[in-house]
Image (tube, rainbow, N blue to C red):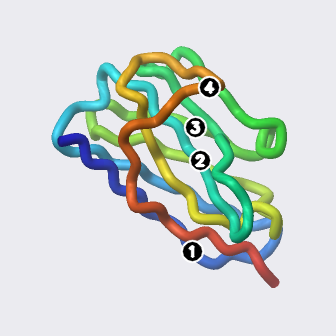
Amino acid sequence: QVQLVESGGGLVQPGGSLRLSCEASGYTLDYYAIGWLRQAPGKEREGVSCISYNGDNTYYSDSVKGRFTISRDNAKNTVYLQMNSLNPEDTAVYYCATDGGPYCYSDSVYDYWGQGTQVTVSS
């Protein structure tokens, strides 16, 4: 079974930075696109970013574009989300996920999820 584990969340002040990691087990990431999604209290999950299987294509939501950077190191079976210039609106549980395919789509239905990592931005 595919297993995804997120890490790197925490409490930061506005304007600060965090780097989230998503490590896979049970399979290698070589063939799979990985998306980052988040869910804030009282809100639906929203897509944040996605990276294709080989890193050639990336996607960012309008709310994070220019502040977040997604990358991957398939040799380490890990995808990263570098988050800069954080603001309180970024507070959420962040999840990594895959639909089992190699490419990113705005309407992807994700079959595999991690447990999530909490990001809190507050002064």
- Between disc 1 and disc 3, whose residue precedes? 1
Task: Measuring from the top left, give residue 59's x and y in whole percent.
Answer: 66, 27
22 relative to 43 in the view: left or right: left
Secondary structure state at the residue bearing disc 3: strand
The answer to whether marks 1 and 3 mark residues whose Cβ atoms lie closer than 8 Å is: no
Report which residue position mark 2 lands on: 37
Q: Which mark is residue 70?
A: 3
Q: Mark 1, residues whose alpha carbon is within 10 Å: few (<14), some, or many (≥20)?
A: some
Q: Position of residue 112 (x, y in %)?
A: 36, 42
Task: Judge the density around disc 4: few (<14), some (14-19), many (≥20) Cα neighbours within 10 Å.
Answer: few
Quadrant position of residue 57:
top right
Q: Quadrant of residue 36?
A: top right
Q: Amino acid at mark 4?
A: Asp
Residue 115, above or below 70: below
* Type of the residue with mark 2: Leu
Of residue 97 and residue 58, the one placed in the foreground of this image is 97
Apparent side of residue 53 relative to residue 2 in the rendered image (left or right): right
Q: Which residue is mark 4?
A: 107
Q: Earlier in the sequence, mark 4 or mark 2?
A: 2
Q: How would you rate the neighbour count of disc 3 (Cα within 10 Å): few for under 14, some for 14-19, many for 20 or more?
A: many
Q: CA distance from mark 4 to mark 2?
A: 13 Å
Q: CA distance from mark 3 to mark 2?
A: 12 Å
Q: Secondary structure at mark 1?
A: strand
Q: Secondary structure at mark 2?
A: strand
Other-residue count near label 2 (Cα within 10 Å), few / some / many at <14 / 14–19 / ≥20: many
The reply to whether callout 3 and callout 2 are in contact (CB within 8 Å) is no
**Disc 4 and disc 3 in contact, CB within 8 angstroms:** no
Real-space Cα distance between discs 4 and 3? 19 Å
First of labels 2, 1 by sequence position: 1
Report helix, strand or loop for mark 4: loop
Q: Residue at x 38, y 34 (%)?
A: 73
